[in-house]
Amino acid sequence: MAAEKTRYSDSELQEFKDLILQKLEDARRELSNLQSQLNSSNEHGTDDTASTFKVLEDGSDTLAKEEAGQLAARQRKFIEQLENALIRIENKTYGVCRVTGKLIPKERLRAVPHTTQSIEAKLNQYKD
């Protein structure tokens, strides 16, 4: 019986690297869109609108900017996680569960390429 694999091969790591680079590009584009939303000022032209409606409009703009800010923060964290995954690929430690030390199945890595835990480890953390 062959020994259990302890890491992914260089060609497998390259496949994940390509996937992560594409996700990074998409995530950075999305972050850029969110940041431009945050930076845009009152573009609805409500300057000449009755003051009652202007207050409502300003409240709506504030809420939209708060949501965009939260999405931007989440997107920055996602980008950081993807960049960390690239470092793990370079170190050849990518795809190894940091809890169990076993290889994380490829299907999980394709779905969540920045993960550092197998499903087994993830589920066990909630049992305590």
Image (cartoon, helix red, strand yellow):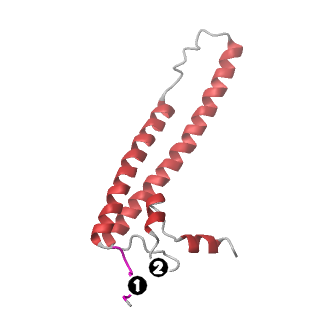
Up the image or down, 124 lies above or below 34; here it is below
Q: Secondary structure at mark 1?
A: loop
Q: Position of residue 44 (x, y in %)?
A: 55, 18
- In the rendered structure, which segment of residues is drawn in magenta? 2-8
Counting other residues with Cα less than 10 Å from the Cα at mark 1, is it few (<14), some (14-19), or many (20 or more)?
few
The residue type indicated by label 1 comes to Glu
Counting other residues with Cα less than 10 Å from the Cα at mark 2, is it few (<14), some (14-19), or many (20 or more)?
some
Up the image or down, 69 lies above or below 55; here it is below
Q: Quadrant of the C terminus?
A: bottom right
Instruction: Give the residue drawn at x 35%, y 65%.
Output: 87
Instruction: Give the residue drawn at x 48%, y 27%.
Output: 40
Residue 122, quarter of picture: bottom right
Residue projecting furthest to the front: 1
Residue placed most toward the observer, 84 or 66: 84
**Label 2: which residue?**
102
Q: Are marks 2 and 1 in contact (CB under 8 Å)?
A: yes
Instruction: Give the residue drawn at x 38%, y 91%.
Output: 1
Residue placed most toward the observer, 49 or 15: 15
Question: Quick check: 46 left or right of 20?
Answer: right
Question: Quick check: 69 left or right of 79?
Answer: right
Q: Secondary structure at mark 2?
A: loop
Q: Position of residue 30 (x, y in %)?
A: 44, 41
**Label 1: which residue?**
4
Q: Nearer the viewer, mark 2 or mark 1?
A: 1
Q: Position of residue 22 (x, y in %)?
A: 35, 50
Residue 42, quarter of picture: top right
Residue 17, quarter of picture: bottom left
Q: Position of residue 50 (x, y in %)?
A: 67, 10
